[in-house]
Image (spheres, grey):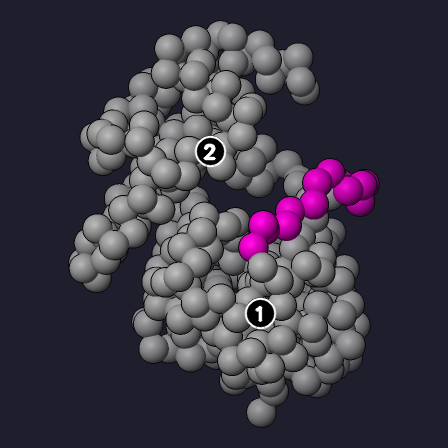
């Protein structure tokens, strides 16, 4: 049985999937299976996956009708044989030592989650930004005692998970939606007992046209409110809403108000979703102005919050235009 199952959802990425798979097959830790989940691709992606599998016995290809990113990940979870799970998006790639470092750290510390730094890159491979969490490194952190873990990047792919975390919690990714990562990651944090953070950059995230961050369909940003309806309802159902109310409040402010407003403003500063984001925050957390994590926003986001509160959308749009 392989130590780790690496799940790669594949959908119409014929330009990228081979580079992604090669970065996985080149890992210094060879004890893994690679599950390429062809999610109903209409280009040559499925054929490329089959060719890759024909060259390396560690690779399995699963062809399925399109179920979306979340649905493809769930297929991989169900098919996985490993003790650990790692998700990689098919247009991204790994650094060669990250699986070995993450798995050895997880086994040494007994943690259920091992998280590592990542960088964003453009289509030319140029580094845009490096993301590291400001938490103690290389030591197990109890999730209940280090609640700032909930405020870390919610992406699925900079984390190595014990497979048992998914089995025992029954948490899965919602299919065919935006923001499936944050919906799922926060539930996994609630289920986990310990996490470890590595300072190593292990993942390269490609910012390309068509990603949520660059998508021009402003209307679909309403799904961030649906995502937080899901998250808040889940914590309430688990009897943990009050316990984590401060963290949930900050996350709603950051993701469902600030970040969502910026995405929409960069497309249409008169869009009707803009006041809805503000109304959602006020309705769910009317005392958000007293949140203990507000200082985490930093100067630029505090300025953004100030302008949003006054509905000075034109000025925000102008600032981003000048910056861009």
Q: Position of residue 275 (x, y in %)?
A: 31, 19
Q: Is residue 27 left or right of residue 13?
A: right
Magenta stretch: helix, strand or loop mostly: loop
- Residue under the point 65% across and 55% down: 117
Say the numbered circle drawn on residue 295: 2
Magenta segment? 123-135
Q: Is residue 84 above or below residue 214?
A: below
- Between 104 and 91, the one lying in front of the other is 104
Q: How many neighbours does mark 2 have within 10 angstroms: few (below 14), some (14-19), or many (20 or more)? A: few
Q: Is residue 98 above or below residue 298?
A: below
Q: How many neighbours does mark 1 have within 10 angstroms: few (below 14), some (14-19), or many (20 or more)? A: some
Q: Mark 1 = which residue?
A: 139
SS for callout 2:
helix
Q: Is residue 32 visible?
A: yes
Q: Position of residue 231 (x, y in %)?
A: 30, 50
- Residue under the point 46% across and 33% down: 295
- Between 110 and 167, the one lying in front of the other is 110
Q: Position of residue 164 (x, y in %)?
A: 42, 79
Give yes or no for contact between labels 2 and 1 (Cβ–Cβ under 8 Å): no
- Residue under the point 58% across and 69% down: 139
């Amino acid at each position: 049985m392989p130590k780790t199952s690496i799940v790669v959802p594949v959908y119409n990425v014929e330009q990228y999937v081979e580079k992604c798979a090669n970065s996985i097959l080149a890992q210094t830790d060879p004890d893994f299976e690679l599950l390429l989940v062809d999610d109903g691709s209409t280009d040559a992606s499925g054929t490329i996956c089959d060719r890759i599998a024909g060259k390396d016995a560690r690779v399995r290809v699963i062809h399925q009708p399109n179920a979306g990113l979340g649905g493809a990940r769930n297929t991989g979870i169900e098919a996985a044989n490993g003790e650990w799970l790692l998700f990689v998006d098919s247009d991204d790639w790994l650094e060669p030592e990250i699986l070995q470092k993450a798995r050895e750290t997880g086994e040494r510390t007994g943690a259920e989650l091992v998280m590592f730094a990542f960088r964003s890159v453009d289509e030319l491979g140029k580094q845009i930004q490096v993301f590291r969490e400001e938490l103690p490194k290389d030591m197990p952190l109890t999730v209940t005692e280090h609640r700032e873990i909930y405020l870390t990047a919610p992406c699925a792919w900079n984390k190595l998970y014990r497979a048992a975390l998914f089995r025992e919690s029954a948490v899965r990714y919602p299919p065919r939606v935006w923001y499936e990562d944050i919906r799922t990651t926060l539930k996994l944090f609630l289920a986990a007992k310990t996490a470890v953070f590595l300072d190593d950059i292990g993942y390269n995230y490609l910012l390309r046209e068509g990603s949520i961050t660059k998508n021009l369909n402003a209307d679909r940003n309403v799904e961030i409110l649906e995502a937080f309806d899901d998250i808040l309802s889940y914590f309430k159902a688990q009897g943990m809403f009050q316990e984590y109310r401060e963290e949930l409040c900050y996350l709603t402010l950051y993701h469902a108000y600030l970040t969502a407003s910026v995405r929409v403003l960069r497309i249409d500063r008169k869009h009707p979703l803009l006041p809805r984001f503000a109304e959602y925050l006020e309705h769910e957390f009317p005392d958000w102005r007293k949140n203990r994590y507000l200082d985490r926003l930093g100067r630029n986001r505090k300025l953004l919050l100030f302008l949003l509160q006054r509905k000075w959308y034109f000025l925000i749009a102008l600032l981003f235009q000048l910056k861009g």
